[in-house]
Amino acid sequence: MIAFATLLERLTLTPGRLAKLALLREFFRTEPDPDRGWGLAALTGTLSFPLAKPALIRALAQARTDPVLFEWSCDYVGDLAETVSLIWPARDDAFGRNSVRTPPMLAEVVDGLMHTPKAELPALLEGWLDASDPPVRYAILKLMTGALRVGASARLAKTALAELAGGSVSVDEIEEVWHGLAPPYAELFDWLEARGPRPDPQDAPVFRSPMLAQPLEAADIAALDYAAYCAEWKWDGIRVQLVSVPGGRRIYSRGSDDVSAAFPEIVEAMGFDAVLDGELLVIRDGEVAPFADLQQRLNRKVPGVALMEQHPVAVRLYDLLFEEGEDLRALPFEQRRARLEAWFATHRPPRMDLSAVIEAADFDTLSSLRDGARAASIEGVMLKRRDSPYVAGRPKGLWWKWKRDPLTIDAVVMYAQRGHGKRSSFYSDYTFGLWRDGAEGAELVPVGKAYSGFTDAELAQMDRWIRNNTTRRYGPVREVAPGLVLEIAFDAAQRSNRHKSGVALRFPRVARLRPDKPFEEADRLETLLRLIPS
Amino acid sequence: MTPHPSGWLTPRPEGLWCAPGGFHIDPVQPVAHAIVTHAHADHARPGHEHVLTTPESLAIMRTRMGEDRPAREQQELRYGEGLRIGDVEVRLEPAGHVLGSAQVVMEYRGSRAVVSGDYKRVADPSCAPFVPVACDVFVTEATFGLPVFRHPDPRGEIGRLLDSVRLFAERTHVVGCYALGKCQRLILLLREAGWDGPIYLHGALMSVCDTYERLGVPLGDLRAATGRARAELAGAIVLAPPGAIADRWARRLADPVVGLASGWMRVRQRAKARGVELPLVISDHADWDELCRTIDEVDAPEIWVTHGREEALIHWIEGSGRTGRALRLLGYGDEEEAPAAEGEGAAA
Ligand SMILES: [Zn+2]
Ligand SMILES: [Zn+2]
């Protein structure tokens, strides 16, 4: 538990991605089984302990401490678990000395929290707290309440695992077996450390890293061999992977989060044996609703009946990856498309349709079709090479995304400030930035400021995020760790010497939150610079 | 009849005033006669007529202020030596806070008061340990007067720093620390832990280190950090004032891991708010347990609290069957809480 507690503390306070990776790698390299596996489960959000409630922690601490001092301490520290971890008084032994105790192993804590009857939990927890120092107590209490908040995504943990394997296993290969594994992941570590075979997910509904498109820039257009590509609309929803196999049904986001519970009507409609790539949308009477409607659904882990009725979701299918166990990913796109159409004609699953192929004889025709598409639900067009296999990641030149105007960029929130008037109690004004290559790797450079256009509930959510992820304060301004992606719409980009980035945005506004987008994949500064008219 | 200390030791705006001795203790304004507990800037102010303190504190004050600035007349008093001032017997005893730090023990007509200044109880290789003195009134600070402040063993904290240096061998570890006391203690803790190599210092930390060495505290291989190539400081430990670690100065270092050595680092939000990646909970002030233990040991029926979180400590004092009194002296800060923007110039 000591190594895990140290890892949590350092991850919380370390801003750099590379440093976080080094910390994770070190933990996985040095911590023995099964503790490192339980640590991995905790970091990837795989554990939950429904019986362990904050009230239990509070009651234990109140029984051990002066109630006045405890309340003052809570007020000062501002976090129950942290207060208890610090204030917890060591219990002296019969001779008045602090007896030497060994803190529990992580595996022992996980096992205890999972299998101890509710009535016996307080005594168990008390014993652990007595035997631990503040960082370990903090880790136990945060683990119990499921609020680790260390600023390291599951993807980052898996990236560290791939590094542990020393290049013999890629992060995408880990993704492909991940959802077939269970903590403490002994098989996985055996594979990564070349002691055992690749774990066989067998029938498990595992996630496959999706294929992504590159933005089509002016320079690419000139070199584009249009005849080699198929065109499709780019729909403004969230990209999902539908996995329905004999071992189960899952809906994954493109970041590999299991979002099945949020869309039960889709899960119900997945009565087939296939893996599909598509766009999740709110569709009413055949019309795709604006993204804000889908946002309502995304805000809820489990939807109520009314919400499901008012915001009905459907999946617009792009691609067929597996059909009845057959892996189609190596086939050219055109063949997969034919298989998808045939498959769809046979199965006709409810709440699903095909994303149509756009018939445009040449690039100019496509261009005018794109400009003419006025529906808010269309983000632009996709160009997919007819011979492209389905490969994980963002391979160059196979798929292009060509967003339509108004101009938008996906930017990362860097600083936040309180708003004015009714928003003065919220951090609602954001400075956002784009990536560029700095002297020490990728760095964010601020490109503009915008006020949020969110509902009060979204604003409260943003505000909480800002407060929990503040890394530094400059008077009223908070610097936050990279993590929050906003889609910024603007009318034009202009060259500017007054800005560090060399560019100024005309009428920037927050188009929407992009919780689905990993911050590392926000746009780069060059993308914006290319939008400046010469 | 023995007079109660409240009759002859009184808080005044300029500091604690001892009428029968005609002196102030740690006055925040220039006075005729000052007794200074230690050389931190909020306790040792310049410009008095006469100052009395330990030889070590006086040497440090001269280094930091200039030879003549502490007072027109400067008088030394060694630990344990008695001196009669007016009608009061005065002696200084170690406070364990920084080199030369002292408690002021005063006896007047059979009643005894001890003003402890800033103090701590854990071992510190850079200064003499605190000596508890039984008394009628014990005057204490309460910087960390809340039971959430429990400083861990500093050797464990140094261990975490060295673990990090091993893990991030290409990065510079820059640790914020106050120039007087904390800096030298960190150096000696590193030496104890086996770090024999060079330790690099921000320019603002050099002069006090020189003074410590002159006073017989060897610190080993110290080098100036300023003006060195980025590559030369990769893998090095650099000490700097707290104000410099988040500053342009630190950005020139090799991908720095920013640490800060302070008792406040116990609370994560504090570390986070200051952009500290490696908080080291090392303090020169007593933590909650040390405050309570000291009050028990000196066993005074009455405890006066000068500054800090006096509310919680007085709650505990009253609960222990003693009388607690908040003096609410103004002008004393805490060197560990120096905000990022100030650092070196801030109160101590
Ligand atoms: Zn001091
Ligand atoms: Zn002080």
Image (cartoon, rainbow, N blue to C red):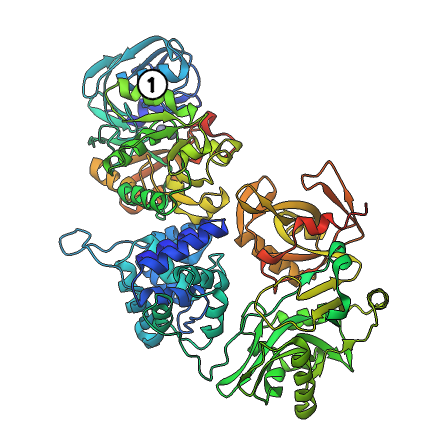
> Along the line of sight, which residue is nearer the eye, A225 or A376?
A225
Percent x, y for residue B123?
A: 23, 36
Element at badge 1?
A: helix
Identify whether A178 is placed above or below A202.
above
Is residue B237 placed above or below A280 in the rendered structure? Answer: above
Q: Quadrant of residue A330?
A: bottom right
Q: What amino acid does circle 1 point to?
A: Ile
Residue under numbered circle 1: B60
Q: Is residue A365 left or right of residue B299?
A: right
Left or right: residue A94 versus residue A459 is left
> Looking at the image, which residue sits at the far top?
B72
Residue A532 screen position, x and y as percent: 78, 47
Q: Residue at x 30, y 73 (%)?
A: A120
**Which residue is painted at 82% across and 66% down in the image?**
A363
- Foreground residue among B346 and B137: B346
Quadrant of the picture in which ligand 2 is shown: top left
Label 1 chain ID: B
Please identify the residue farthest to the bottom as the structure is shown. Answer: A346
Quarter of the figure that contains the C terminus of chain B = top left
Q: Is residue A443 in view?
A: yes
Is A172 placed left or right of A380 in the picture?
Answer: left
Residue B254 location in percent, x, y? 46, 37
Residue A128, given in percent of the width and then of the height, sits at 28, 63
On screen, B239 above or below A388? Answer: above
